Amino acid sequence: MFFRLFLLMRKEFLQFFRNVPLLIIVLYGATLDVYTAGEVSMDVHNYPIAVYDIDQSAQSREVAGKLREPFFQVTHFITEEKQIENLIEDGKVSVVVVFPKGFGEKTASYQTAQMQVILDGSNSNASELALRYLSSIVYEHNLDLLVTKWKISNVTAKFIPYVDDQTLYRYNPNLIDRWAFCLQEFFTIMTLIGMLLTATAMVNEKQFGTIEQLMVTPLRTFEIMAAKIVPMVVVLFIATFIAVFVILKPIVGVPLAGNVWAFFLVTLIYSFAISGFGLVISTLSNNLSETVLFSLLMVVPIMFLSGAWVPPEAMPGWMRFLVMFSPLKYYLDLGNGIFLKGNSIFLMWKDLLFLTSLGIGAFLLGASRFRKVFQ
Amino acid sequence: MTFSVRRFKAVAQKEFLELRRNPLFFLMTVLAPLILFFLFAYGFPLDAKNIPMGVLDLDKSALSRTLLDKFEAGKAFRIKQTAGDYASLEKELSLGRIRAILAIPADFSRNLKRGLPVTLQILVDGSYPNRANLVSGYAEATIFSFRTEILRDFFIKAFGSAGAADLPIDLSVSVWYNPSFRSEDFIIPGIIAIIMMFFPPLVSAISLAKEKETGSILNMYCSSVTKTEYLLGKMTPYVLISYVNFLIFLLCALFIFEVPLRGDLPALLIVSAFYTATAVAMGLSIAVCVNTQIAAILITAMVTLTPSFLYSGFMVPVSSIGEEGRLLAYGLPATHYIDVARKIMVKGVGFAEVKLSVLALVGFCVGLYAISIAWFKKRLG
């Protein structure tokens, strides 16, 4: 029995390794695709800003001088009012700061002076952030002015009840975007490849009628299923190995804070879980195009609900419930936990438990449907 | 051979019939994108909301309570755990159950009352840097408003008059196009662009790769149809269906999600038609190069979805993407389309202001079809 199982697995391996384009794609997914995902940076910095200084006073220049990197970059000095509209409409700048006439005089005599800010609200998130930076810069300046206004000497200025804050970042102290993006892309691509490979390997036999040949062999349904899944798991495992030791650790520089073998164990469980999902899809579809559509209909929500793009707590309540059924969520949490946080898998036993049960569930569902369809 | 409209129509008709007779496939090309559209549109609040936060309040005074109330008042934070020691909070952080820890020192209110500076510690989970930035940004904004109140009280008390704390510089802010900072206005045109860049390329890639893989393309090889007629005819149904899809998305955006349409509707419709044709052409050009469906599918999924998602300016403005990333960004049709769509819908500009992006899209469209036709060989091997 083991021998014939071995033979069938060998056939699957040969089939996979002889499909050169497919091999290249899997390799690309595990290496370059993961690497390039790290090129993007989500941080809003060097926000392009335009200054329209009508006042041209020392005071206005002083404030304008404080609008600098890393938050802002003054890219345009405007001399006419109508330029404001052009710059914002073309998206060249998203913030325009205007110092009206008399700004310097008023601040010098400690009257309240207006400083106008025009924001492009169409990029709501970035403009909110920009406004926040801007307010705090102006506030610090205000404070300086107040202190001089009341002639508080430097000595007594220390006795102002000032609430300061100090922010530290755990697990990625310098907030290197690359780590998070490459890991995220890797977890996602494993899901996509794993699900599609398993599903298509099954459906191909159906579509080309070679399933008939398998049916007349002494192999049992269970053996056919196992022979299809085990090679895919092995392929995913190899891809993981390459991704971790060729790309993620040496090139991207992700700190492998936890136990790498624990991560491989998690990957093993995840590969089986994902191929379970692939199995379910393969029993639902009759040809490749259907397989792909079903897979996408499953993969994209799985990705979306994983929390990789949107943190679960920001989703509406019903969606937060669905998050529980996304296997990628657990893989992501476990993977990030091991790679970045250095957690032990015993600490994260709940995630592991949920992932395993999801995998078993999908596997059982797939297996029972498989029996019905193929017998 | 000259281009024959009759043959072109025949191919298009055959493809359309094939689609119609495969109800599952037909349903999925129409229904699946719509489901995703709603999932994304409802699930993409980019504002920070309900960030779970742990608090280590060593002071436990009225003043520290006021600070915490400030955190709870906004919708950004949800204080999840106040009791406990540092170690248990850190465990929660490592399990991802809270995203930040706020530590209030024991002498917080005592020092403030004596006019001494105090420092609050914020520990943020950095495993998602963009989220960490958002969390610390909101936390600092909350502390900022608390700081302002404390200082105002101090100045008024120290100098007697209520006007003592008037700030010398007053910021007057005006927000254009989107005064209430509605993130839907920003996000939904992007979601349309992303979904349009995902499904149409896939179905078009599958449709050609399927003929190649199953061998039915041989019928075409030995017929009188030219490759230009064949490829264009084959893609026509997909462009049309995808465009109908787009129109449905647009209606949903306008009437369900209340995204404004301030600019030229005809301009938007024309640009979107080019974008749709480009998306279909992406799938086509990939399918021309490979022989199996699975290869076509995987390549299409990799070159369309993720790059469009990350680089197109969908979530981050293109200006803050790194140097190489920006080059890639401008090489993506989605970048140009999102730019045009946002400008027309939200900013209300006309054709003239977006002509460069429109030109780029037309270029992509024509270029991809030309490449596909040139590469496509009407023979075996």
Image: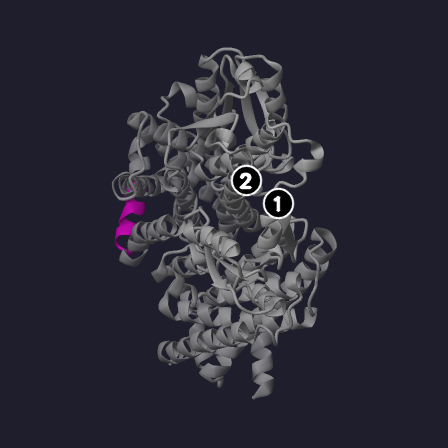
Q: Is residue B54 left or right of residue B189?
A: right
Q: Nearer the viewer, residue A323 or A360?
A: A323
B13 part of magenta stretch: yes
Q: Specify the segment rendered in magenta.
A: B11-22
Residue B340 is drawn in which quadrant?
top left
State the image coordinates of residue B46 (x, y, percent, origin top left): 44, 46
In percent of the image, x 59 and y 86: which residue is there? A2
Q: Quadrant of the N terminus of chain A?
A: bottom right
State the image coordinates of residue A272 (x, y, percent, origin top left): 53, 73
What's the mark number on residue B154?
2
Residue B16 in view, yes or no = yes
Tell me, yes or no, whether dots 1 and 2 are on the same chain: yes
Marks 1 and 2 close (CB-CB < 8 Å): yes
- The residue under label 1 is B115
State the image coordinates of residue A322 (x, y, percent, origin top left): 39, 64
What's the mark number on residue A283?
none
Q: Is residue A258 left or right of residue B29?
A: right
Q: Quadrant of the C terminus of chain A?
A: bottom left
Cα separation between marks 1 and 2:
8 Å
Residue type at mark 1: give it: Gly
Neighbor class of circle 2 (other Cα within 10 Å; few <14, some 14-19, many 20+) is many
B348 part of magenta stretch: no
Residue B191 is drawn in which quadrant?
top left
- Chain letter of mark 2 equals B
Neighbor class of circle 1 (other Cα within 10 Å; few <14, some 14-19, many 20+) is some
Q: Is residue B202 left or right of residue A150?
A: left
